[in-house]
Amino acid sequence: MNKLKILLLGTASIAMLSACNNTGKKQNTSDMDIHQHANEEANYVCPMHPEVTGKKGEKCSKCGMELEPSAAKKDRFFDVKLSSNPEVIQAGKPTNLSISVTEDGKNVTMDVVHEMKMHLLVMNEELTWFDHIHPKEQADGTYSVSETFPGGGKYLLFTDYKPVGASGNVKMMEVEVKGTPLDIPKTATEKLVSKVDNYTVTLTNGNDLKTDRGQLLKFTVEKGGKKLEEKDIEQYLGASAHIVMVAKETKDFLHIHPISDKNFPIYAETQVKKAGIYRMWVQFKIDGKLHTADFTVNVSEGPKATGDNHDKHAHH
C-alpha cells in the first residue's frame, strides 16, 4: 500500500460517558477497548452508568442505552485494515477510504450506535482540522467513505465501531497526504470560548478539568446575547451533541455523548485518564444545521480516588 501508513494503538480501558480513550502507545496490534465497567460480575452493564447491570437486551434505567457485555465476556480481537483509492492521497482531491473489520478472518457484523454502524473521526496531526464522517457498509462487508483532505501532511483516523455481542472499539490509523501543508495557526495553550456561525460556545468549567475523577463538561451556547436552552438544541446522531477530545502529545482519544441537564444546553460526564493539553470539538445542530466548535483545554492531575471516596460520576 503506497504511502499509506497504518498505526495501531494498544488496548486501553477508560471510564467515561459513552466515551473512548486510547492509551497513546504506538503498537502494531490490537484495538482499543473503549469502555470500563465497574461491576465485572454482571453479565451486561451500561457503558454510561456501570452501576446499572442487567441481562442481554435490557436498557439502562438512567439513560436508556442498551446494556453491553461485561469485561469478562468481551475478550475478542478485531483486525482493522485501511486502504485508499487512489493509493497516493493528494490534498484537495476526493479519496475513497475503505475499512475492513475482521475477526478470525471473517467480516464482523456491526451494531448501530448513534444511528451509524461506524464513526470515523479525522484530524490532522497538529489537531487544527477536524471532520466526523460515517463509512457505509458495502456488499463485501467492508465500509467505505469519501474524504477530501484539505492539505498535505499526516492525518489521524480514529475508527469507532461496535461489533455485535462485544463492547465498542476504537482503532487509530495514520495516512500521509501529498500537497501543500495546511496554513492554519497552531492552537494556543487554552481556548475555552469558541465562536462558530454566529454562536458563542463556552466551556464554563474549562479551568477545572482534572484526571482520575468524575469530570463534568458544562457548555453554554449564546446567539445575539441570548443564552440558548436545552430545547433549542436538536438531536444529532442520537444525542444532543457529540464531543471529541484528543491529547496533543499522546493522542489519547475520547468520544463523549452529552446527556440532559436543565442548566446547560450541552452537558456531559466523563473521566480523563491522563493529564495534558487536549483539543476538543463539540458538534451540535440547530435549525437543521450542524455546527462544530473547537476548544483547547489543559487537564491537570487530580487526586487519586480511594476506596470510599468516589465522586458520584467517577465511572462515567
Image (cartoon, rainbow, N blue to C red):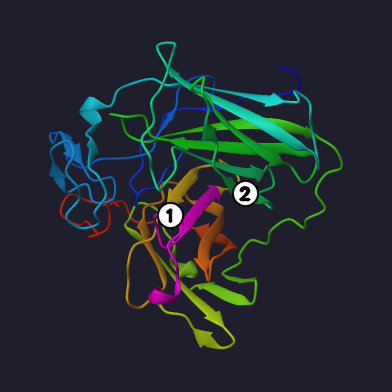
Q: Residue at the spot x=28%, y=50% of the render?
A: 48
Q: Which residue is more in the foreground, 176 or 279?
A: 176
- Judged from the image, the secondary structure of the residue bearing numbered disc 1 is loop
> Can the viewer see residue 72?
yes
Q: Residue at the spot x=48%, y=22% of the render?
A: 141
Residue identifier under label 2: 131
Q: Which residues are magenta?
A: 230-246
Residue 307 image position (x, y, % from top left) = 17, 49
Q: Which residue is more in the foreground, 146 or 177?
A: 146
Q: Which mark is residue 55?
A: none
In the rendered image, the vertical position of residue 261 relative to residue 58, given as above or below: below
Residue identifier under label 1: 301
Instruction: Report the residue that reaches farthest toward the front.
Output: 139
The quarter holding residue 224 reads bottom right
306 vs 211, left or right, is left
Residue 262 among those drawn in magenta: no
